[in-house]
Amino acid sequence: MDLSVAIGSLRLRNPLMAASGCFGYGVEYADAVDLASIGAVVSKGLFIKERSGHPPQRIVETPSGMLNAIGLQGIGVHRYIKEKLPELRRLGATNVINICGSTLDEYVELARILSDAEGVHALEINISCPNIKEGGITFGCSMNGTFDVVSAVKKATHLPVIPKLTPNVTDVASIAKAAEDAGADAVSLVNTFLAMAIDVETRRPKLSNIVGGLSGPAIRPIAVRMVYECRRAVKIPIIGMGGIATATDALEFIIAGASAVQVGTANFVDPFIWTKLIEGLRDYMGRHRIARVAELVGSIDTTKREKQWTSS
């Protein structure tokens, strides 16, 4: 069985990627998973400089999910290249770097720095973090802003460019199309949903930032729908994410139109999930006599249901 997939010029050994913010920088999970066995590791979001993030409380468990307002804490791009990237190269990881900025110039500078770093395979542009007041979500909530940042980064790098899209818009497919028009090699979606939780005894927000991003199984059906809508709007590959905890969950996204998927919150529940996911994909492909996982991408059959709808 062939589990390999292509995301533009990026070749992944399988469609499973560790999502940004839920897998550290990758090296933290090296004792739990062979990093060379998964499709790619997406780094925690990197700014040019170090960033402390928000004060506690930063994570709250919710029914079927998790609410976070970490605030994009990170070590900065220069420390990442010096301290993390050499070990990731040694471990054979495919590294997709999530880059963050407050201005176009910051995104461009990050792209230039990382383009010269050995062992970086692609850039994921974070234009969708919902829990910081400044930064890329300003770009990601409009078609013009998305177009501008993607086109600027494309001019600054030879690496595949993958903007990460926000679900906190009216029409995510139009944002995906703007990214494609700007030259994006793929799009990844969705980031977390803007949400909040309140302690009713104190009547205070549970998060220090008041609002944060909701992830986990609660958002999966909405995320699958958004992947399906974007698949109908763009021709470039889509990387789907949102509440994936089983191989069946991953297959939903793939059948809806995702060429690859990212697993995030589930890493906190089960650090050993990767072997189970790969075995689950192989089992499904064996039962359905599918030789290549790429054959499943966008294979959803809506013909009968569309006929039923039009006839009624």
Image (cartoon, rainbow, N blue to C red):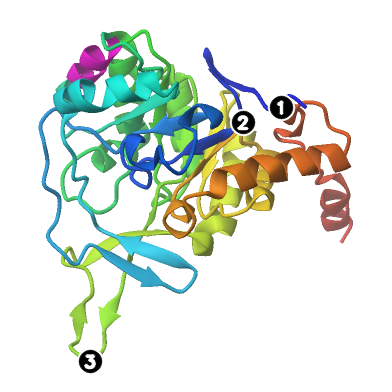
Whether 254 is among the magenta residues is no
In contact (CB < 8 Å): disc 2 and disc 1: yes
As measured in the structure, the alpha-carbon distance from the residue carrying label 1 to the one carrying label 3 is: 51 Å
- On whether residue 108 falls in the magenta region, the answer is yes
What is the x, y in percent for residue 120?
35, 17
Q: Quadrant of the C terminus?
A: bottom right
Q: Quadrant location of the N terminus?
A: top right
Determine which residue is flagged by label 3.
201
Which region is colored magenta?
Answer: 107-115
Which of pointers 2 and 1 lies earlier in the amino acid sequence? 2
Q: For numbered disc 3, what is the local secondary structure?
A: loop
- Residue pointed to by mark 2: 259
Q: 10 Å neighbourhood of mark 3: few (<14), some, or many (≥20)?
A: few
How many angstroms separate mark 3 from mark 2 (CA)? 45 Å
- The amino acid type of the residue labelled 2 equals Ser
| Residue 151 x/y as whole percent | 33, 17
